[in-house]
Image: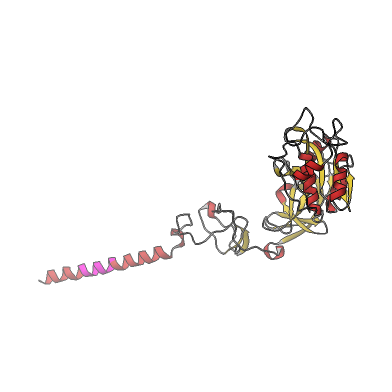
Amino acid sequence: MRIYKTKVVVFVLMLLSTTMLFVLLIHGCADSPTDVQPNTSYTNLDTIYTNTFTTATDTTTPVPSYDITDLNPETILANSDISTDTSIPASAPVSTSPADLFGITETNETMIVSTTSSDLIVRSGPGANFSLLGYLTKGSVITVTGFTDNGWYRFNFNGQAGYSAGNYLKKYNLNSTSNITPPKTEIPIDPIDLVNLDVPMILQRPELPYGCEIVSVTMMLQHSGAVVDKISLANEMPYHASDPNKGYVGDPFKGKGKVNAMYPASLAGIIDKYSGGKSYIMTGLGMEKLKSQLKAGYPVAVWMRAQGFSLHCVCVTGYDSKYIYINDPWVGQLKLTHKDFLDKWNAQKQRAISYMP
């Protein structure tokens, strides 16, 4: 009986010891940071959007794709486990002060834009979430006045601080042959030098498959405030047997013969009658005059080679640093690069007409 009681006491003591050890192990596992590593299997709490700024408060190892490199809290660019959803909600944080977000090291270095093909975007702060100021062309030479901790370079752009990604800028050596493109001066884009006139879009089809000229002029006249339509103007415009400078040759409704066209001079009378001003033939005056006319608030009908036609007429409605915007009566609203537009326009001797007050 005494031996039996001794065995029971020993068994109870062993059971208590095992239970306490188990509890300690469980508690240790729950508190041990080395046993819980970041990975994508955990419950999703929220989304960090591309180019959103966040604050790091700790480091993790040894998972390299989630590693945060500094122990001290600092603002970093979120670049791991990025959401593929590009629709950033209104509540997404957008920082407005570069100085509050990144340390800026002052410098004074001459650098050259070394993009492969496109222009370099300039923003108001060191990140893609800051507002667009304009562009620098490939080969532009600038003076960098500072660089930020996240790799963006600061410089003077059109009278204010501009920022561009540093990996597209390299040190410029005037005597070096390693500069891929010839040096250029900085070409700032004037944000005021942008035009987008609200010109009604009118298609020539199905009624006027050969009437691109009068439809383009109809868009221009409607913008001036005239109450006109393409059909009535097509019936009213002058016609001529052989000279497109004096009237329409052919039939804009059905097509007739090898030529179905008219030139700016033959449309001057219609424009004089309905524009409230005076027709302005701009043939051969060039791109700068075209832009000046648009900037003054007047759309321009131009003749070009486009849409598979050797002769086609469109209504030019605006421009920016890269594109010329047009209302094409054959297909709708389009944009062409400056070079592409000029090539197509030159193919028709830069024929154009507008109006003046």
Asked if residue 171 can be seen in this view, the reply is no
What's the magenta region?
Answer: 11-18
Q: Residue at x 85, y 42 (%)?
A: 267
Number of marks drawn: 0
Q: Nearer the viewer, residue 265 or 289?
A: 265
Where residue 275 appears, as percent x and y from the top left, is 84, 51
Q: Is residue 282 above or below residue 72?
A: above
Magenta highlight: main SS? helix
Outermost residue, left side? 1
Decide if residue 293 is on the left or right side of residue 215.
right
Q: Is residue 16 above or below residue 184?
A: below
Decide if residue 213 is on the left or right side of residue 11.
right
Query: Residue 73 lies in what quarter of the image?
Result: bottom right
Decide if residue 185 is on the left or right side of residue 48.
right
Where residue 221 appears, as percent x and y from the top left, is 80, 49
Decide if residue 151 is on the left or right side of residue 138.
left
Can residue 14 be found in the magenta stretch? yes
Where residue 19 appears, as percent x and y from the top left, is 29, 67
Q: Residue at x 49, y 62 (%)?
A: 45
Q: Is residue 229 above or below residue 60?
A: above
